[in-house]
Image (cartoon, helix red, strand yellow):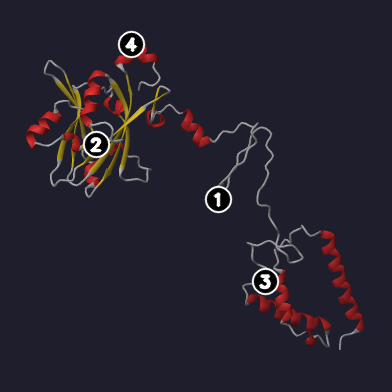
């Protein structure tokens, strides 16, 4: 049997431990991150009737059994990943964390930060985005200029070429002679081969309009669809600049080299026309683009441009008319 004096000492030690726990407070984390729930479960499986005779020896035997119980669960008090209060309840963490910043702060996190909320009266610099906005490198400038030129919003024209035949289709874009040549060679209408997005304007109408109203082409986007997608992207453009003296200059453009290495889409190419040609491109009937569309492929070309309307240049009434396009 347990001696009464030894039992009283054991009870006093437990009371002192409880008092120390209350003095620590509930928000203090145990240094060893002990899992008290697992400890309680281990104690429930121990038969304390074995505490008899020599009290210290019996207590040591119980301690060894508790350790063996904990070892079967992967060590009771050795999980470093969880943090618990002495009461056994999990330590609650706030969903958000306020970081007071007076002048400057750098936030580094192992996991991506999905949202950063900043008061409207504070200045914020996001390094990667700010460098992109402030950078004046040619490759960055060409992306920022997409759809704009010197701060002015550009117009868009979309041409759709659907080659549903079994033969490759050789095209000279913006050449005013091609509709008639195509008619003589095939007895077909070129407007049925080339469609202008919107359906209200034919391709031949676009050609005659460009002859009278000069247009400066800035950017282009090609979207390819069909069985020979990669082969189509490898087809180069040939920009042929001619003069009435019978002289021509050919500038080849390999659009496959314009594909961004980081882009996900493999069927789209966006490039700066002026930057690749090192000169302005103004289709006036003598500056044409030679291109081949492979059999079965469909190529959609979108051009960003600015155009001068001669009727608005010469006539004040045209400039002041709001309904006139």
Question: Is tag 3's residue or tag 4's residue first in the polypeptide sequence?
Answer: 3
Question: Is tag 3's residue or tag 1's residue first in the polypeptide sequence?
Answer: 3
CA–CA distance between discs 4 and 1? 63 Å
Q: Please rate how many residues cluster around mark 2, counting C-alpha atoms within 10 Å: few if below 14, some from 14 to 19, many from 20.
A: some
Q: Is residue 91 left or right of residue 317?
A: right
Q: Secondary structure at mark 3?
A: loop
Q: Identify residue for label 1.
A: 111
Question: Is tag 2's residue or tag 1's residue first in the polypeptide sequence?
Answer: 1
Q: Is residue 270 left or right of residue 177?
A: right
Residue occupying the far left of the picture: 185
Query: Of tags 3 and 1, which is closer to the observer?
Result: 1
Q: Identify residue for label 4.
A: 315
Residue at image point 35% right, 42% down: 261
Question: Is tag 4's residue or tag 1's residue first in the polypeptide sequence?
Answer: 1
Question: Is tag 4's residue or tag 2's residue first in the polypeptide sequence?
Answer: 2
Q: Please rate how many residues cluster around mark 4, counting C-alpha atoms within 10 Å: few if below 14, some from 14 to 19, many from 20.
A: few
Residue at image point 86% right, 76% down: 10
Q: Identify residue for label 2.
A: 195
Q: Secondary structure at mark 1?
A: loop
Query: Of tags 3 and 2, which is closer to the observer?
Result: 2
Question: Is tag 3's residue or tag 2's residue first in the polypeptide sequence?
Answer: 3
Q: Identify residue for label 3.
A: 76
CA–CA distance between discs 3 and 1? 29 Å
Above or below: residue 192 compared with residue 176: below
Q: Position of residue 209 (x, y in %)?
A: 25, 23
CA–CA distance between discs 3 and 4? 91 Å
CA–CA distance between discs 2 and 1? 49 Å
Q: Secondary structure at mark 4?
A: loop
Confirm or deny contact between disc 3 and disc 1 (CB under 8 A): no
């Amino acid at each position: 049997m347990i001696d009464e004096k030894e039992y009283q000492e054991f009870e006093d030690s437990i009371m002192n431990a409880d008092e120390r726990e209350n003095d620590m407070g509930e928000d203090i984390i145990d240094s060893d991150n002990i899992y008290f729930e697992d400890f309680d479960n281990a104690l429930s499986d121990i038969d304390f009737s074995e505490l008899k005779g020599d009290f210290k020896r019996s207590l040591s035997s119980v301690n060894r059994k508790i350790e063996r119980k904990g070892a079967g669960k992967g060590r009771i008090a050795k999980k470093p990943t969880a943090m618990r209060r002495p009461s056994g309840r999990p330590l609650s963490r706030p969903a958000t964390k306020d970081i007071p910043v007076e002048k400057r702060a750098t936030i580094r996190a192992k996991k991506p930060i999905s949202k950063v909320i900043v008061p409207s009266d504070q200045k914020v610099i996001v390094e990667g985005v700010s460098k992109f906005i402030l950078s004046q490198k040619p490759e960055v400038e060409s992306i920022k200029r997409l759809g704009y030129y010197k701060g002015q919003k550009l117009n868009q024209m979309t041409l759709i070429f659907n080659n549903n035949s079994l033969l490759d289709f050789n095209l000279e874009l913006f050449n005013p002679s091609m509709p008639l040549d195509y008619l003589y060679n095939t007895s077909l209408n070129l407007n049925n081969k080339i469609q202008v997005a919107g359906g209200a304007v034919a391709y031949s109408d676009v050609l005659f309009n460009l002859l009278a109203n000069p247009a400066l082409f800035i950017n282009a986007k090609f979207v390819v669809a069909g069985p020979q997608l990669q082969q189509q992207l490898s087809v180069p453009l040939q920009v042929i600049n001619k003069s009435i003296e019978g002289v021509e200059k050919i500038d080849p453009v390999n659009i496959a080299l314009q594909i961004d290495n980081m882009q996900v889409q493999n069927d789209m190419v966006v490039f700066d026309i002026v930057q690749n040609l090192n000169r302005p491109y103004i289709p006036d009937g003598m500056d044409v683009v030679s291109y081949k569309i492979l059999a079965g492929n469909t190529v959609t070309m979108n051009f960003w441009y600015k155009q001068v309307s001669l009727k608005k240049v010469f006539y004040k009434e045209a400039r002041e008319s709001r309904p006139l396009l």
